[in-house]
Amino acid sequence: MGDVAELMGLGLEEVKLPVFVNATVEVEPGDVVYVTGESGGGKSLLVRHLASEMEKHPDFAPVVCSWDVVGRVRRGVPLVELVGGGVREAVEVLSAAGLSDVFTWFRSFEELSDGQRMRFVFAKALDMGARTVILDEFCSALDRETAKATAYTVQKFARKRGLTLIASTAVDDLFEDLNPSLLIIKHFGPQMDVRRYTPAPRPCSLLRDVAVEEGGVDDWRLLAFLHYRGHRLGGVVRVFRAVLRGRVVGVVVYATPYFMAPGHAEFFNPEWYRRMRFGYVLRIQRVVVHPSFRGIGVARKLLAESMPRLGVPFVEILSSMERLVPFTRGLMRSTVVETSPEKAAKCEEFRRLFGIDLRRHGAAEVYEYVGRTAGLRRLVRWLEESLPVFAQGRRTRVGRDNAARLLRLVKSSASPKVYGLWVSPDERYADVLARALRR
């Protein structure tokens, strides 16, 4: 330092650069605060000071900061075990942060992408009971589309929970999707602009560029690995895709309803449904959205724009995921379909015979356990006797080659589900609706 002073003719006290001079920031409970500005301008210093001051006030405390959360997250542990007091609560918290797919729930923090890590930090803050969440370096390392989707998801759920959210980043293109009530632009040096807004709810900016197009099975194959159920399709009638700037980000597969869906009698005249569903009803067989774009409305737009183009008066869905992530809410009428007494009795019989609960363990885990303890021959016999209960009376030849697949079918059939029904508003179907629907 002495060499520098000698060279420049300056002392240490003469090269101090003020970062804040008479700065005033007034944050109100429930604000979404967007702190941006060039790197090195003092954003991190500002949000850390805000954190220490807000922790002193009951309207804002407890304050949870991203730098604290990241340091405390246990590595090598599935996300579903890091939040909530049980699986259902964990799924609710993770879904609230936009982490709404099964595969992500069972990944560890270090296995997540940068965007997923940011969403998990927010989820963990919710789980810790935060009233204020401060996220530094928010979306700084993300591509712009993922950053905008993450910004939208986080601010939406912060507002839903009534939290105060402060997001600090050098990225300056998130204003529309963060939709802040307070914008702080921290310039290099002591200058700082503070602007207050009265934001109104609005959709994610990315949805303007999402186009819903007719697609094909190849589009499903692009995203099939992301779906929590089997990747096989059957009876496919139409496929639609959601495309964002040339990239497929969502797919829905519509199929013929070969099997009668439990729950249909809540809305349909059962005899009409039994005889006439072919030609008048299509079933949503699969819906999948890329994880980076969940929570911004892609699935809703995909369904809302494709169902009226199917040329049928009714579209139905039978989904286990809908109980946890109600993505058809507002689009479809729905009812919960609980496990029937016959299926429940069969599952209890399975537990007694094989010593493992089929409903509480994955099909692969059950298959391996039974093969190791009771033997696959006993499993094959049980499946041959029991499949008609789970497959509407249909009998199937069972062998070692298909036992694992049929075990997944049994497990899926035994799980509680939501039956949903979309009814076309097109007046040309008025007579069909009058005959088909219960009054």
Image (cartoon, helix red, strand yellow):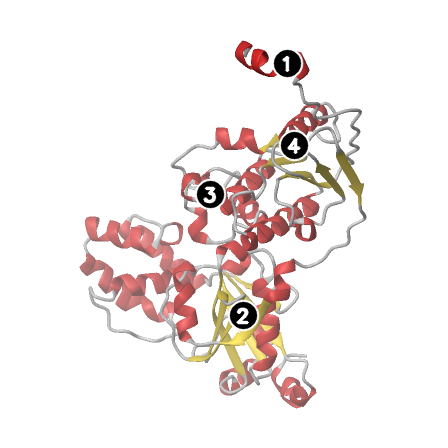
Task: Pick the residue in front: 397 or 73.
Answer: 73
Q: Disc count in the image?
A: 4
Callout 2, which amino acid?
Gly
Callout 4, which amino acid?
Gly
Mark 1 or mark 3, which is nearer the start of the sequence? 1
Residue 125 visible somewhere in the drawing = yes
Q: Residue at x 36, y 60 (%)?
A: 346
Q: What is the distance, in whole Å, between disc 2 and disc 1 at their CAs?
A: 81 Å
The residue to which callout 2 is attached is 263
Q: What is the distance, in whole Å, between disc 2 and disc 4 at their CAs?
A: 59 Å
Q: Position of residue 170 (x, y in %)?
A: 61, 40
Q: Is residue 62 above or below residue 419?
A: above
Closer to viewer: mark 1 or mark 4: 1
Give the structural element (helix, strand or loop) at label 3.
Answer: helix
Q: Position of residue 422 (x, y in %)?
A: 61, 74
Mark 3 or mark 2, which is nearer the start of the sequence? 3
Q: Position of residue 130 (x, y in %)?
A: 64, 34
Specify few, some or many for label 4: CA neighbours under 10 Å numbering under 14, 14-19, or 20 or more.
many
The residue to which callout 1 is attached is 10
Specify few, some or many for label 2: CA neighbours under 10 Å numbering under 14, 14-19, or 20 or more.
some
Q: Which residue is most to the top?
A: 2
Q: Residue at x 64, y 65 (%)?
A: 208
Task: Pick the residue in front: 58 or 432.
Answer: 58
The picture quadrant where one finds residue 4 is: top right
Q: Which mark is residue 80?
A: 3
Q: What is the distance, in whole Å, between disc 3 and disc 1 at their CAs?
A: 57 Å
The residue to which callout 4 is attached is 41
